[in-house]
Image: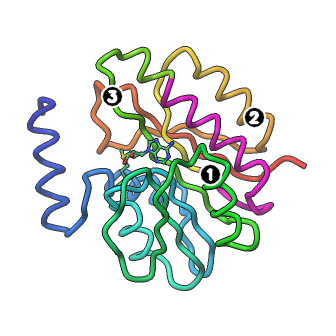
Amino acid sequence: MDSKSYQDHFFKKAKIAGYRSRSAFKLIQLNNKYKFLKNNINILDVGSFPGGWCQVVKEKIKGGKILGIDKKKIEEIKGVKFLTGDFLDEKSKSNIINYFNSNIDVILSDMAPNTTGNKSLDCIRTNQLCLDILEFSKEKLSKKGVVVSKLFMGEEFEEIKIKAKKNFKKIHFFKPDSSRDESRETYIHCSELST
Ligand SMILES: C[S@@+](CC[C@H](N)C(=O)[O-])C[C@H]1O[C@@H](n2cnc3c(N)ncnc32)[C@H](O)[C@@H]1O
């Protein structure tokens, strides 16, 4: 399937399923593989606009708290709390911490900066966001928690791998089928925080 047909395929599939984004299928595939969406857990979804991942989370789990944050305002989803703000701001981080009032069980990030057209710059900026998520997770994730974050295959890949290995006992990389073959996008799944 060429890139356009591929995008159309998942666009139609998302529309039929009632998801706000094609990305919803990436989270479904990630969860099929690693099974981190469980009942009664606290979940943070960073870079959640327009809300496809939060729709999937809400569908899959009962109980616990679900918080989504994005720079863009997100249309309401029943049972999901949204914050509008830049995750990198300390204020946003303290709003997140105050909302959960305890450690977080699952941290998801599909964050991607606005594309500039310059592939290496976009790659560096996306990977910097991934490193920031790993740093935040080290502080705020519960001991048996899980982090899933988008990254791009590029120069910073090794740095991400080293940081993840330092902080977690188990790390895996997975590219869902719903992520275009030619895209350098992939996802890291980290579990079991190191002490
Ligand atoms: C690929 S979209 C996420 C799609 C989402 N997972 C879904 O299924 O609907 C990436 C999002 O990351 C957000 N983003 C990028 N940098 C951010 C930051 N520093 N803080 C918060 N959101 C950010 C963008 O605004 C964008 O909406």
**At 51% from the left edge and 21% from the top edge, which residue is drawn?**
124
Across and down, in percent, residue 148 comes to: 56, 49
Q: Are marks 1 and 3 in contact (CB under 8 Å)?
A: no
Residue holding disc 2: 165
Secondary element under disc 2, as helix, strand or loop, is helix
Which is nearer the N-term, disc 3 or disc 2? 3
Looking at this view, name the residue that lies furthest to the right.
Answer: 195
Amino acid type, mark 2: Lys
Indicate the quadrant where residue 155 lies.
Answer: top right
Which of the two discs, 1 and 3, labels the residue nearer the N terminus? 3
Q: Residues within 10 Å of mark 1 (few under 14, many from 20)?
A: many
How far separated are the C-alphas under marks 3 and 2?
Answer: 29 Å
- Residue 120 falls left or right of residue 130: left
Residue 6 magenta: no
Residue 40 relative to residue 179: left or right: right
Give the x, y percent position of residue 64: 60, 80
Residue 147 badge: 1
Main SS of the magenta part reads helix
The answer for how far apart the CA atoms under marks 1 and 3 are is 24 Å
Q: Position of residue 5 (x, y in %)?
A: 9, 38
Q: Earlier in the sequence, mark 2 or mark 1?
A: 1
Tell me the quadrant of the picture where the N terminus can be found: top left
Residue type for callout 3: Thr
- Ligand 1 within 8 Å of disc 1? The answer is no
Q: Is residue 79 left or right of residue 107?
A: left
* Label 3 beta carbon within 8 A of ligand 1: no
Q: Which residue is mark 3?
A: 115
